[in-house]
Image (cartoon, rainbow, N blue to C red):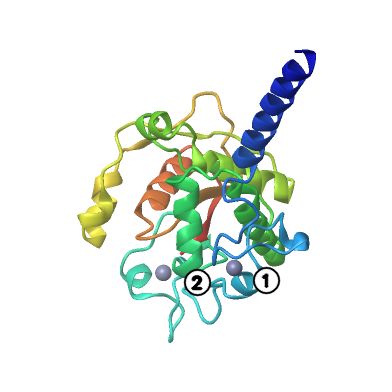
């Protein structure tokens, strides 16, 4: 009888340990790119060396403001016609292939352990540029999105970058209104759709500060531009945008 009880306890403990392992490593020790089992030395990286080598790092000539790939001149067509409110936007990756999958795994799939992995790349990229910032902040998500998902992935990314760069994180912006689905809007309509959507958090020190603003991806740049406008009207000296991908 005693042995039977012990066996039951051991089985329950094993179940607990297994569920803990699954929660920490939801995919098991497999590569998030190709699904192959990861070699022991790569298990903290989530990707096998081959997939890591195929990550779409941004290379080549880029627009001097938004970072979009260009072939000639200094600015892309959009920034030449309409200058965004932020000073510069940077991203280590192009938004395609495996990076697109990882971003969706994070924000839709809730695989939060990807935060550390992705912000490692974001921080390393910024370190390479040797720029100075006073504060790291995030493009805020809507309350509804946070409630639905149970987490706020942009603030998690901002906190990860803050830790990686050793620059303090501070929540500087609130989103006032519901997020508009921008996917069906044209370029200039996207800028109009986000107008007035953000406000500064009361009692935060922004005047004279150089701000690193974090988001997951930069598409039209309308949201980042609107956030930069609000930060600058509160006195921010410079607003630089950093996203995972562009
Ligand atoms: Zn792989
Ligand atoms: Zn541009």
Residue 61 — which label?
none
| Direction from residue 243 to residue 117 in the image, left or right | right
| In the image, the residue with mark 1 has its CB under 8 Å from the nearest atom of ligand 1 | yes
Q: Residue at x 43, y 86 (%)?
A: 71
| In the image, the residue with mark 2 has its CB under 8 Å from the nearest atom of ligand 2 | yes
Number of numbered callouts drawn: 2
Q: Would you name the residue on which mark 2 appears? A: 64
Q: Residue at x 57, y 51 (%)?
A: 27
Q: Quadrant of ligand 2?
A: bottom left
Locate the N terminus by quadrant: top right
Residue 69 at x, y percent in the picture: 45, 76
Asked whether disc 1 touches disc 2, contact meaning CB atoms under 8 Å apart, the reply is no
| Direction from residue 101 to residue 46 in the image, left or right | right
- In the image shown, does 180 or 172 lie closer to the viewer? 180
Q: Residue at x 65, y 67 (%)?
A: 48
- In the image shown, does 98 or 152 lie closer to the viewer? 98
Can the viewer see residue 123 in this picture? yes
Q: Would you name the residue on which mark 1 appears? A: 49
Image-quadrant location for residue 18: top right
- In the image shown, does 170 or 203 lie closer to the viewer? 170
Q: Is residue 133 above or below residue 92?
A: above
Q: Earlier in the sequence, mark 1 or mark 2?
A: 1
Image-quadrant location for residue 144: top left
Q: Is residue 196 above or below residue 243?
A: above
- In the image shown, does 194 or 178 lie closer to the viewer? 178
Neighbour tally class for label 1: few under 14, some 14-19, many 20 plus, Cα within 10 Å: few
């Amino acid at each position: 009888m005693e042995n039977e009880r012990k066996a039951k306890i051991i089985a329950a403990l094993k179940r607990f340990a297994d569920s803990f392992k699954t929660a920490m490593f939801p995919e098991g020790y497999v590569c998030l790119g190709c699904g192959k089992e990861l070699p022991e030395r790569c298990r903290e990286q989530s990707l096998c060396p081959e997939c890591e080598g195929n990550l779409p790092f941004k290379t080549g000539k880029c627009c001097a403001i938004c970072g979009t790939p260009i072939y000639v001149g200094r600015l892309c067509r959009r920034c030449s016609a309409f200058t965004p409110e932020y000073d510069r936007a940077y991203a280590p990756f192009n938004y395609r292939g495996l990076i697109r999958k990882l971003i969706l795994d994070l924000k839709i799939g809730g695989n939060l352990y990807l935060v550390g992995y992705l912000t490692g790349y974001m921080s390393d990229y910024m370190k390479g540029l040797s720029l100075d910032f006073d504060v790291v902040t995030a493009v805020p998500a809507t309350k509804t999105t946070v409630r639905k998902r149970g987490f706020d992935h942009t603030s998690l990314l901002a906190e990860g970058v803050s830790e990686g760069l050793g620059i303090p994180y501070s929540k500087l912006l609130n989103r006032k209104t519901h997020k508009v689905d921008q996917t069906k809007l044209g370029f200039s309509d996207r800028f109009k759709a986000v107008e007035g959507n953000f406000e500064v958090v009361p009692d935060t020190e922004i005047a004279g500060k150089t701000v690193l603003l974090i988001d997951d991806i930069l598409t039209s740049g309308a949201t980042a531009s609107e956030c930069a406008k609000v930060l600058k009207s509160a006195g921010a000296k410079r607003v630089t945008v950093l996203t995972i991908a562009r």
